[in-house]
Amino acid sequence: MEKNIATIPGHVAIIPDGNRRWARARGLESWKGHETGAENFEKLISKALDKGIRCLSIWGSSMDNLLKRPVAEKKALLDIYKRYFKKLLEGKEIYENEVQVNFIGHWEEQFPESLKSTIRETIEKTRHYKKRMLNFMLAYSGTDDMLMAIKKINDKYGVGAEITPQIIKENLMTAALPPVDFMIRTGGEPHNSNGFLMWDTADAQLYFFGGNFPDFDDREFEIALEDYAKRGRRFGG
């Protein structure tokens, strides 16, 4: 028997693929695609708040993005992060909507101190909010998250322990996040990457946008949400 879903997903996760391809198609440097992508996220966050989405998770970068990209592109990306997160911190939107902002991944190992300082301040100033969650996945890989969780569980419980779904969830970087209801990937490639939120997306509805991320604006987000509202979820039934 089919189970009806609410018209608005509680937790939306976005894989913003295609920033560099968008820039190359226009004869621009790669960093310009990331810059335009960051500007686009401002629109999407506002739309998510306006639509009543309780939790929004955004994949900002994987470890490969930071370790394998050219130094100049990485430097530009980190500068964009710093300016954008500073703007988020100093704006009114997250406070008026009581949004708890989280940063998940190995960003503390990869980012310069000036950027980490802004991130820590944002975490601290929004820690007490409970109405909404905004999560930035930075230097994050779902595969790595799962491996780390398994190692922690092994250290805690040892051989022969009964491992439950609850124990697995409690040991993930994403332990505080609710399950993902709707995962959106842009860039025209219908697949996941690096096991992004692999545990949390087990029952998620998927949506693949054919264009690159800078073209996935607030109107396209609205179309995606309308598509979600028409669907049903069976949960194995």
Image (cartoon, helix red, strand yellow):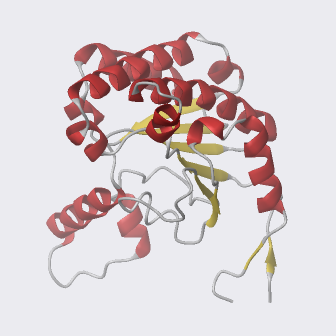
Horizontally, residue 126 falls left or right of residue 73, namely: right
Given residues 14 and 175, the one toward you in this image is 14
Query: Which residue is at a point 59% across and 71% down the rendered structure image?
Result: 203
Horizontally, residue 56 falls left or right of residue 43, namely: left
Across and down, in percent, residue 123 comes to 44, 26
Q: Quadrant of the C terminus?
A: bottom right
Q: How many marks?
A: 0
Q: Is residue 120 above or below residue 14?
A: above
Horizontally, residue 201 falls left or right of residue 144, namely: right
Query: Which residue is at a point 46% across and 34% down the rendered structure image?
Result: 24
Asked if residue 128 can be seen in this view, the reply is: no
Given residues 121 and 142, the one toward you in this image is 142
Query: Which residue is at a point 33% across and 53% down the rendered structure image?
Result: 141
Across and down, in percent, residue 40 comes to 62, 29
Query: Which residue is at a point 68% across and 44% down the rendered structure image?
Result: 54
Across and down, in percent, residue 53 comes to 72, 44
Q: Is residue 159 above or below residue 38?
A: below
Picture quadrant where residue 51 is located: top right
Across and down, in percent, residue 112 comes to 23, 20
Q: Is residue 159 above or below residue 212?
A: below
Q: Quadrant of the N terminus?
A: bottom right
